Amino acid sequence: MVSSFNPADSINNERYKRAVFYLLIILAALQLSITLLTNGFALQQDEAMWHYIGRNWFRNGLVPYRGGTDNKSPLFFAIFGLSDRLFGVNYWFPRVFGTICQSVGTYFLYKIADLLAGKRAGLLAISFYGLSVLWHGADGRYVSYT
């Protein structure tokens, strides 16, 4: 049986891998610049509340939801509590972490589109999705939100 290895296919695969990598880096850099530079250098109202709950949990042992409920998971408060424990009161750690999570999700979107429709469709999907999450209407500044 003759092998159907084509050297051009491996070159194209490498080209697509590089394109995906560079596109993800560019989209993450754009997202970081929007979320860190256009939102003021302070926590928003909701972020401050979540930071307060996370700080009280990590510093004082006050577990969230004791005597109350909310639609946020405890992991969400743990991210803000970890942020406070590692860096004190800050606005950037949850936003950088949110950008990283968003970039991982964008990469998985590429993998799904690649599996279903091919590499070009994957690049198109991450381009549309990656740029649309930067819009003001899509709350591009608030990557630390749920």
Image (tube, rainbow, N blue to C red):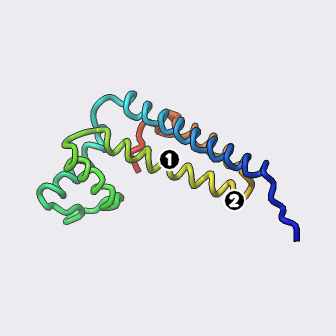
Residue 16 found in image quarter: top right
The label on residue 118 is none
Q: Quadrant of the N terminus?
A: bottom right
Real-space Cα distance between discs 1 and 2?
18 Å
Which residue lies under the disc numbered 2?
A: 115
Of residues 10 and 35, the one drawn nearer to the viewer in this rendering: 10
User: Are the residues at dot 1 and dot 2 in contact (C-beta closer than 8 Å)?
Assistant: no
Q: Is residue 46 left or right of residue 9?
A: left
View extreme (front): residue:
2
Against 108, residue 103 (above or below) is above
- Image location of residue 26, percent across then percent down: 53, 35
For this rendering, which residue is in front, 63 or 35? 35
In the shown orientation, is residue 59 left or right of residue 20? left
Q: Residue 98, how many percent across, how many down?
A: 41, 47
In x, y percent, where is residue 127? Answer: 63, 40
Q: Is residue 62 above or below residue 146?
A: below
Which structural element holds mark 1? helix
Under tag 2, what secondary structure? helix
Is 74 on the left or on the right of 116, as rendered?
Answer: left
Q: Residues within 10 Å of mark 2 (few under 14, many from 20)?
A: few
Q: Position of residue 42 (x, y in %)?
A: 27, 33
Q: Is residue 98 above or below residue 41?
A: below
Residue farthest along the right direction in this orientation = 1
Q: Which residue is mark 1?
A: 103
Identity, as a three-letter code, of the amino acid under mark 1: Ser
Using residue 105 as the reference point, say whether residue 50 is left or right of it. left
Q: Amino acid at mark 2?
A: Leu
Q: Residue at x 57, y 43 (%)?
A: 21
Q: Residue at x 80, y 59 (%)?
A: 5
Q: Residue at x 34, y 61 (%)?
A: 73
Count of all numbered marks drawn on residues in the image = 2
